[in-house]
Amino acid sequence: MKTYAVTALAAMMCICVGCASLFKDKISVRDAVSKKDEMEQSDNIARKALITRDLEKKRVEIADALVKDIAASGNIDYEFSVLVTIALENVSVDCYIYTQDVAAVAELVKGKTRIHAIGDFGRFFTMLDNKNVKMEIINADIKPLADK
């Protein structure tokens, strides 16, 4: 009976951890880049840390984007990454989207499939020219959009 209770408790904890991201606030790519700009303008490293922690509590939503590429993952926790580019006013944002759902990734066709994706904010990478931002979105749900 004790073993059964421990097993049930462990299963419930796994389910709760998996569901935790469902309760995170959603933000757009534009909002995430705005937070990044706020971080870069601050000279206070504690302020930068607080902004980063705040972003880590968010889920980034990409409403409609064309799949630019599907590649082997640079993140050890995932097999593949889906790359989309979001053009904002003054910057282009390459979003590397990581998911455990290999079947969903297998259905995508680079250069043709448009997707809706939502996932946990991972981190930013900035190129030297500051014209191109790279953002990592982890634990994502990817859904192909119907052809228009």
Image: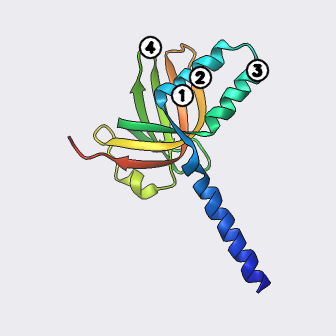
Q: Is residue 27 left or right of residue 64?
A: right
Callout count: 4
Does residue 10 lie above or below 45 as drawn? below
Residue 35 figure quarter: top right
Q: Which residue is mark 4?
A: 90
Q: Report x, y in % for residue 14.
A: 65, 63
Instruction: Indicate the amino acid at tag 3.
Output: Ile
Labels 2 & 1 near each other (Cβ < 8 A):
yes
Q: Is residue 138 left or right of residue 118?
A: right
Q: Give the spatial CA distance, label 2 vs label 4.
A: 14 Å
Q: Which label is found at residue 36? A: 2
Q: Which residue is mark 1?
A: 32
Secondary element at tag 2 = helix
Q: Give the spatial CA distance, label 3 vs label 2.
A: 13 Å
Instruction: Choose the circle earlier in sequence order: 1 or 3.
Output: 1
Does residue 61 lie above or below 22 as drawn? above
Q: Which residue is mark 3?
A: 45
Does residue 5 lie above or below 68 as drawn? below
Q: Give the spatial CA distance, label 1 vs label 3.
A: 18 Å
Q: Residues within 10 Å of mark 1 (few under 14, many from 20)?
A: some
Q: Report x, y in % for residue 76.
A: 62, 47
Instruction: Indicate the amino acid at tag 1.
Output: Ala
The colour style of the image is rainbow
Instruction: Indicate the amino acid at tag 4.
Output: Asn
